[in-house]
Image (spheres, grey):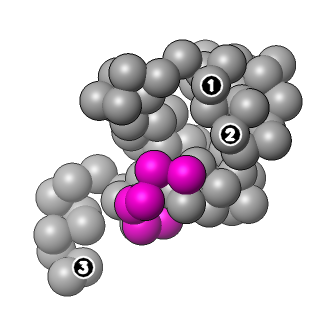
């Protein structure tokens, strides 16, 4: 598994968690960030990788850091 693929898997999982914690749909996230719905669906299904810009938009929308979206929780703690 490549580094980029691992980051995309972690990011997809974290975005799903953020959606659930905030009781938002991917349609809501698409509207709030300007990321097309079809793009978000592909990212969350791991068909294509998130871009840095997309992750930054999502992190900004939820008021979290970029690192908290792309790194597993234990990796974020180790980096702090």
Name the residue that disc number 2 marks.
32
Residue drawn at point x = 43 percent, y = 59 percent: 63
SS for dot 3: helix
SS for dot 2: helix
Res 28 label? 1
Residue 57 can be seen in this image: yes
The tag earlier along the polypeptide, 1 or 3, is: 1
Residue 75 lies in the magenta stretch = no
Residue 8 at x, y = what percent?
Answer: 55, 42
Cα–Cα gap, marks 3 and 2 = 29 Å
Q: Give yes or no for contact between labels 1 and 2 (Cβ–Cβ under 8 Å).
A: yes
SS for dot 1: helix
The quarter of the picture where the C terminus appears is: bottom left
Task: Place residue 13 in its image quadrant.
Answer: top left
Residue drawn at point x = 16 percent, y = 58 percent: 74
Res 72 label? none
Q: What stretch is highlighted in magenta?
A: 61-66
Residue 61 at x, y = what percent?
Answer: 55, 52
Cα–Cα gap, marks 1 and 3 = 31 Å
Judge the density around disc 1: few (<14), some (14-19), many (≥20) Cα neighbours within 10 Å.
Answer: few
Residue 1 can be seen in this image: no
22 horizontally vs 56: left or right: left
Name the residue that disc number 3 marks.
79
Cα–Cα gap, marks 1 and 2 = 6 Å
């Amino acid at each position: 598994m490549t580094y980029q693929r691992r980051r995309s898997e972690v990011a997809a999982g974290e975005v799903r968690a953020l959606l659930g914690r905030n009781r938002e749909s991917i349609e809501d996230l698409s509207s709030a960030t300007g990321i097309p719905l079809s793009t978000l669906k592909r990212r969350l299904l791991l068909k294509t990788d998130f871009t840095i810009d997309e992750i930054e938009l999502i992190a900004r929308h939820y008021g979290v850091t970029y690192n908290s979206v792309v790194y597993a929780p234990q990796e974020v703690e180790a980096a702090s």
